[in-house]
Image (tube, grey):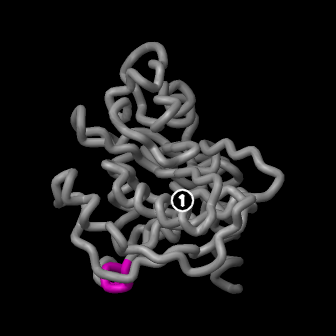
Amino acid sequence: MVHSAGRSLAGLLLPGCCCLCSDEVVTYRNPDVLCPRCKREQAEAKKCVRCSAVLSHEKALPAEDCPACHHLKLPFDEVTSVGNYEGLLREAVLSAKSNRGTSAAWDLGQLLTSHPDVHSTLQPWIVPVPMHWTRRIRRGTDTAAILAKSFARKSGWPFRKLVACHRSLAKQSELAITARKKNVRNAFAVKGPVPADRPIVLVDDIMTTGATLFELARILRKAGASEIRVAVVARSTPQYLNV
């Protein structure tokens, strides 16, 4: 309680920093985690309506023309992201993934809440992409869980650890596209009943090939989920087919 009170007092006396560029934010976490310039750039970004990749075109393209996803069959009702995995956002994600990145991850989770647009009579469940316990020990943090808890706290939607990773996985970023699907196949298990009438929002830091999220969507659909959405901080599209 003393720590919480001290942090609240510091928030009143000291301005916070933008979670992307580190400029001063007078209304830090009340409600903003972005400076005015970064907020304006976020609002102006044009994204694919299907996979949420930021496009370089002046006008949004039809989904079938998006170079990042036109060849993919996405098993999600919606994908939303803060932006592409590059520049300041890439630096923020890398900071959040470090063992001292809890605060950075929390701010990015707060930022995520301004992007999904879920319309439902029931509140969605916010579900982090699970990490195997051995990797959590090695890394010293669980970024997806922090993002999801932050997202849930600000949105008021319930946080649920609905799926678990039951075997150690090779790092997806070090594998070829075809190997990524094999790496995560049957690596996850649903931990409890899945509500058929409630949207599920899967939360993670980066979506690249989507193999992990595809596999999670597969087992959740099999368990009875009817609406699955994805909220990621960054959409990685480094080359035409690497999505």
Q: Quadrant of residue 237?
A: top left
Give yes or no for residue 108 being in the magenta stretch: no
The boundaries of the magenta stretch are 132-137
Query: Does dot 1 land on a helix, a strand or a loop?
Result: strand
Residue drawn at x 36%, y 74% as measured from the top left: 187
**Residue 146 in view (yes/no):** yes
**Residue 12 in view (yes/no):** no
Q: Nearer the viewer, residue 91 or 193?
A: 193
In this view, 92 is above or below 127: above
- Quarter holding the C terminus is top left
Q: How many marks?
A: 1
The spot of residue 164 in percent (x, y) is 47, 78
Q: Is residue 105 left or right of 111 when viewed as pictured?
A: left
Q: Residues within 10 Å of mark 1 (few under 14, many from 20)?
A: many
The spot of residue 171 in percent (x, y) is 23, 67
The spot of residue 239 in percent (x, y) is 22, 35
**Residue that carries the numbered disc 1 in the rendered image:** 202
The main secondary structure of the magenta stretch is helix
- Tell me the kind of residue under disc 1: Leu
Q: Nearer the viewer, residue 36 or 171?
A: 171
Residue drawn at x 47%, y 60% as measured from the top left: 218
